Image: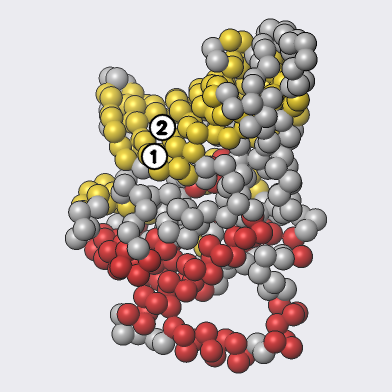
Amino acid sequence: MSTVCTGSTPHPAGAPAAKPGAAGVGDRLFPSLGNGGYDVAHYSLTMDYVLETNHLKGAAVITTRATQDLSRFNLDFAGLKVRSATVNGTDARFARKKNELTLTPAKAIKDGETFKAGITYDGTPRMIEDADGSVEGWIETDDGSTALGQPAGSMAWFPGNHHPSDKATYDMAVTVPKDEDGDPYDVIGNGELTKEVDKGDRVTRHWRSKEPMASYLANVTVGYFEITQDRTDDGLPVYLAVDPDETESAEDVGDLLPEVTDWASKRFGPYPFSSTGAIVDHLPDLDYALETQTKPYFDSAPGEKLLVHELAHQWFGNSVTPRTWKDMWLNEGFANYAEWLWEEDQGGEDGPGDLRVLLRRHPPRKRRHLGLRPGRPTPCRTRLRSSCLRARRHGGAQGARGSR
């Protein structure tokens, strides 16, 4: 689909010709993800979501800086219908091809110029099923929905430069209706809740992430939750949302969250964000947790080691983020190591001893068949799915359950 709004102006005589930005950053595992020619600074996302029909209406304003002279540029976006596009407030032509949205501004953008791309869109957001049967993207729950993005799911609910090499700050304003009893659904996002507006039959909540975030860590979760707000011993705000169906199983999470955060701050250095927390949903068939920034998402009540694992990712993976997906093993390696350190510091099993046992069990001559080659995940070279990463995330903290 293509819509023509405004024609492009020619470049001045003698000036270098503007060129299209690349469709994809050339990541070895996911070559079509991300885009070239610009660097995003901020996403401002305004969304109106109707739970009963699973309908999402959105507007994205993306503040970005050109890294070359641009005649047009791409955004990663899947499924939802684009209604309009602008660049710096002027109508822009746009075209769709699979998961690529191409915007052509009315005039070329100069290298180094800061510009704003605006996109309005609506429809039923897509749940993406990966090759191994697991799901990401916009996922309906028994009382709402959640958005999970590793590695490509975030493109199902907002357009952007969806690759971990391009991090940005976020503002998200999400409007949802009240239920038939007049009670509002809860809306939880990354960062801090800055504003809540009651509009009679609807409620809007504004969430702000002041520290840069990779788009696969962005999250919006809608449903009924029991909200607890606290502070760590170091004074860091704690925001915990627990699905009522998980309240009994998650009764220890409220005490563990600040304890683990303070412990990790002593082990790894100051906590890198403005708040900590967790979302404990009731979606047990999902079968994995994700380290969504500031509030890891759990499909059900987490065990102690899984909580440690996902909070450790706030340092390793979220604050320090790999530039390419093949380096995801660094995120997971440090998070697994954090589990061992926690156990050892709690007077439990000897983590380094566990590692020595593992290495003895798989001596060098036997390790090749495991396919565990850090930074060189050869079994995934020809597969453009998140299962390329997930095979290296299972086990450890959660046994049969997965951890991304």
Residue 252: image x %, image y %? 27, 65
Residue 68 appears in the rendering: yes
The residue drawn where x is 57% and y is 55% is 322
Place residue 143 in its image quadrant: top left
Compared with 325, 349 (above or below) is below
Q: Residue at x 72, y 65 (%)?
A: 377
Amino acid type, callout 2: Asp
Residue 210 x/y as whole percent: 38, 39
Residue 15's spot in the image, x, y percent? Answer: 74, 17
Residue 138's disc number? none
Quadrant in which the C terminus is drawn: bottom right
Kindly check if marks 2 and 1 are in contact, taking CB atoms under 8 A apart as contact. Answer: yes
Label 1's element?
Answer: strand
Q: Splitting the image into 4 quarters, where does residue 366 fall?
A: bottom right
> Residue under circle 2?
171
Q: Quadrant of the N terminus?
A: top right
